[in-house]
Image: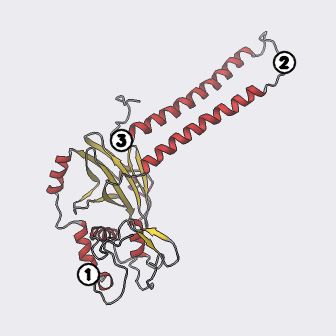
Amino acid sequence: MSAGGWLLPQAATIARPIDTLFFTMVGLCALVALAVMGAIVFYGIRYRRGSGADRSGAHSQSLPVELTWILVPFAIFVAVFLWSLALFARARTPPPDAQTVYVIAKQWMWKIEHPGGQREINALHVPLGEAVRLTMTSQDVIHSFYVPAFRIKQDVLPGRYTQLWFEATRLGSFPLQCAEYCGLDHARMGGRVVVLRPADYQVWLSGHAAAGSLASRGAELFRSRGCSGCHASGAAIRAPPLAGLYGRPVPLADGRTVIADERYLRDSILLPGVAVVAGYRPLMPSFSGQLSEEDVLALIAYIKSLPDTDHGGTSP
Ligand code: CUA
């Protein structure tokens, strides 16, 4: 399905496959609707009052005919389901080399934080042809991050991270819109996604350089909020080491093993009692209500940036 002038532009890799699925389903539904409407009109005219049609009403039953109208639609439904399942998995699984950008929603704006420390509001600058992963959270109510030209949409929830990814295939500026009613100015909670050539994107990044990267802001918080009192190497209190932690499996005291992703790190900072690391006592205080979402993201960026030094290659 190619985009005509009246259609949304297809500006990301997932857009065309989504459109193909969508218009196939519209086509199938249209066929069924037309067949049913056609039959209604045809029989309505043929058996109208006063017509000379044969109404003797011969009854007949046919197992093959019944099986056909049960099994053929069933096969079509299953085929469409498997097709959309494969597409859903593709749309929800960011490639491992995707670059992460953080999104914080609030009434009524989108705050974007790039790993290099660049911040923007109601605008997201991204490079053409490179996978971008968004890690998103909300400061207040449920919002939804929607870029129609990319065919991506994901709810943004307070108290947890959701993610989204895309790879832009067209240069230009594309509307971004909140797609979940979130209060008075919901309809105006929008912005632009600006797709730049990779070289121009680098120019943009350096032109909007902040005082420090997200990770360096996190390092500052790590000291000023007292995290380093327990988690720094050589601290008096024994706390789980954080170097090289990101992405690794973590055995928990209750026997479970979890992967130390952004969600886990966030929960460990705000709700440390929920997932206590095996071999440690639940001493960590909760930082819930004391850190802004920006602070938590900065701390996570800092933890992600810590090189795996103190394990000497013994990591699992
Ligand atoms: Cu935010 Cu609607």
Residue lying furthest bottom in this view?
236
Q: Residue at x 75, y 16 (%)?
A: 47
- Residue 248 in which image quadrant: bottom left
The answer to whether residue 62 is above or below residue 216 is: above
Q: Disc 3 versus disc 2: distance between alpha carbons?
A: 56 Å
Q: Between residues 175 and 72, which one lies in front from this camera angle?
A: 72
Number of marks in the image?
A: 3
Q: Disc 2 versus disc 1: distance between alpha carbons?
A: 88 Å
- The quadrant of the rendering that contains the C terminus is bottom left
Dot 2 or dot 1: first in sequence order is 2
Task: Residue under label 3, please give it.
Answer: 13
Determine if residue 253 is in view: yes
Q: Between residues 193 and 314, which one lies in front from this camera angle?
A: 314
Residue lying furthest top in this view?
52
Task: Residue under label 1, please give it.
Answer: 224
- Label 2 SS: loop
Q: Which residues are magenta?
A: 181-185
* For discs 3 and 2, the disc positioned in front in the rendered view: 3
Dot 3 or dot 1: first in sequence order is 3
Classified by dominant secondary structure, the portion drawn in magenta counts as loop
The answer to whether residue 316 is above or below residue 85 is: below
Q: Looking at numbered disc 1 in the image, what kind of residue is underneath it? A: Ser
Q: Position of residue 111 (x, y in %)?
A: 30, 60
- The quadrant of the rendering that contains the N terminus is top left
Is residue 67 covered in magenta?
no
